Image (cartoon, rainbow, N blue to C red):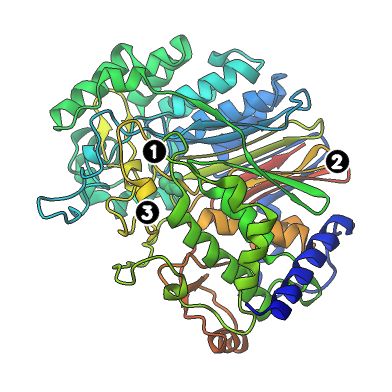
Amino acid sequence: MKLQKKLIFCLVFILGLYSCTTSRPPSPTTQAVPWIFSAEPSLRGKVERSGQKYGIATQGSGATQAARKMFELGGNAADAATAATFAISVERPQSTGLGGGGFLLYYHPSLKNGPVAFDFREMAPARSHEKMFLDAKGEVVPDKSLVGIHAVGVPGLVSGIVKFHRRFGNLPLAVVIAPAIAMAEEGIMVYPELAEAIEEEAEHLLMFPASKEIFLPGGIGLKVGQLLKQRDLAMTLRAISAKGEAGFYSGSVGHKIAAYSKKLGWPITLDDLRRYLVKERTPVSTRFGDYTLYSMAPPSSGGTHIAQIIGMSHGLLRPEKGPMWEQNIHVVASAMQTAFFDRARYLGDPDFVKVPVATLIGPKYLQDLQGRIKLDKARKGDDFAGWPDAFHFEGPKESDQTTHFSILTKDGEAVVSTQTINGHFGSAIVVPGTGVVLNNEMDDFATKVGASNLFGAIGGENNLPEAKKRPLSSMSPTLVFKNSLPVLALGTPSGTRILTCVAQTVINRLIYGLDLYDSVALLRYHQQWMPDKLFVEERGFPKNQHEALTALGHVIETKDIGCRIQAVELNEKKINAVSDPRGEGSSYAL
Ligand code: GLY
């Protein structure tokens, strides 16, 4: 780059940071916000709540009620989060559950070093190796990482949540699990997203007798309005309620998992289960004007790339033009594209590979990356140096699996957690006699260098499967602080789109100053380097804008981006909670 050009970019970057650090927090803009997903007052009224004491947003109604009940019983946000975790496991068996894993960020003002991050991501069973998804010719065996026992990582959710609750909760474990047990025993009404997921995955669920019995009794998938009872799952929850982690990882449940996986030809041994290790990580943090953003560290790519996207975009954006001005979209999309290139190159399990997070989100590197964004032209995926140019890329398949909830109190206690079994109904295996749906998180490894996963994300060497390794994730439970207090708590499901949806929502709220509902509801777009496309929600960009972005070189494709942001904020003294109007979640605030 010529010296003069470089100086201009430096100046833009420094001015951007300066304006960030000196600007007052934006108050909600009065400018009309176009292209909101849906701002109908009736819909808004259903998903937005305001209060003074605490706020909850989850992807279920039972989960929100379970969390609320814990506060009513005198519990804290950690109790509410634990209750929500077990309840959502019953309520969204297609997305999450005891057979899965996740990440959680927790903050309480007594924590002097900021939020703590719990990593209960699945671990590869001890017999895993880097060629486990390849045939004798070195080709990826279709679906082996997605359906059936090879797809399953050692579940971490129970260990993670029970340890978290033991450390920070106030109420007894039995009290916080009780709502989930009741939901599993008494049954929940099947709702549209659940019925659709059953129908979509019927072929795979029918391969496993216990899955068939629960979700397709008599071979017919449960339909909207029918009752889903999960009696075996209730028994497993009772075992956890009585014995903590031991109720899942050993005893009868652990033995059933080990025996059934052996029967299916790829044992997840009792040793794998008992040695599952929850890790406490330091969240990735980045300064951002008056704010400090904390999000998940590797093995999630989320925090690193949210910090990169905001860091690169800031200073190039023109907030007065609004979030849907094509040049602003181009800047954010280009930052997303660059971040995903780094994701494929550098990210993996930090216990196995060196992930240079501090460098990747450092001002020097971000300044360099920002300077490479061409304001007048979108870059092609192949413009990025360092990768062979002959990969086979598949577009991301439709999927909005995974779940997220956010809880925030006026006293500064906050929990955000994203939890998953990966694809809808994970591996499609329910372990007989347990009600536990096993994940297919092994697909989040690179089955082969350069191959794409369920979400179309390209895998690099750092993310090849290895015994006890954790697959790379995009899950991004995120907290934003101001004056040492959490003021925004958010996250979402939807694979690789998670981190771009979280970044956009933060930018909408804190750079453009939209109110929380509009920040969540605004039309979304997503760029992940490969496939070389700018995805936009089905509603799409209006014609003029579509043309302007195409002229800049973007290849636009409309599709369901799948995110369901669950967000709670503390704004002045008011708590606002918003559950994404695209989904079937709910919020509550008091
Ligand atoms: N399974 C989706 C993710 O972890 O990003």
Residue occupying the point 69% across, 19% down = 73
Counting from the top left corner in percent of width and height, residue 427 is at: 28, 42
Describe the element under mark 3 as helix, strand or loop: loop
Q: Name which of mark 3 and mark 1 comes first in the sequence.
A: 1
Secondary-structure class at tag 2: loop
| Three-letter code, disc 1 | Leu
Q: Amino acid at mark 3?
A: Gly
User: Mark 2 = which residue?
Assistant: 483
Q: Which residue is mark 3?
A: 460
Is 579 placed left or right of 322 in the picture? left
Q: CA distance from mark 2 to mark 3?
A: 39 Å
Pair 2/1: label in front: 2
Q: Earlier in the sequence, mark 2 or mark 3?
A: 3
Viewer-proximal residue, 4 or 350?
4
* For residue 75, side relative to residue 121 (left or right): right
Q: Which residue is mark 1?
A: 227
In the rendered image, residue 259, in percent from the top left (x then y), is placed at 19, 21
Residue at the (77%, 77%) spot, across then down: 321
**Mark 3 within 8 Å of ligand 1, using the beta carbon:** no
Q: Is mark 1 within 8 Å of ligand 1?
A: no
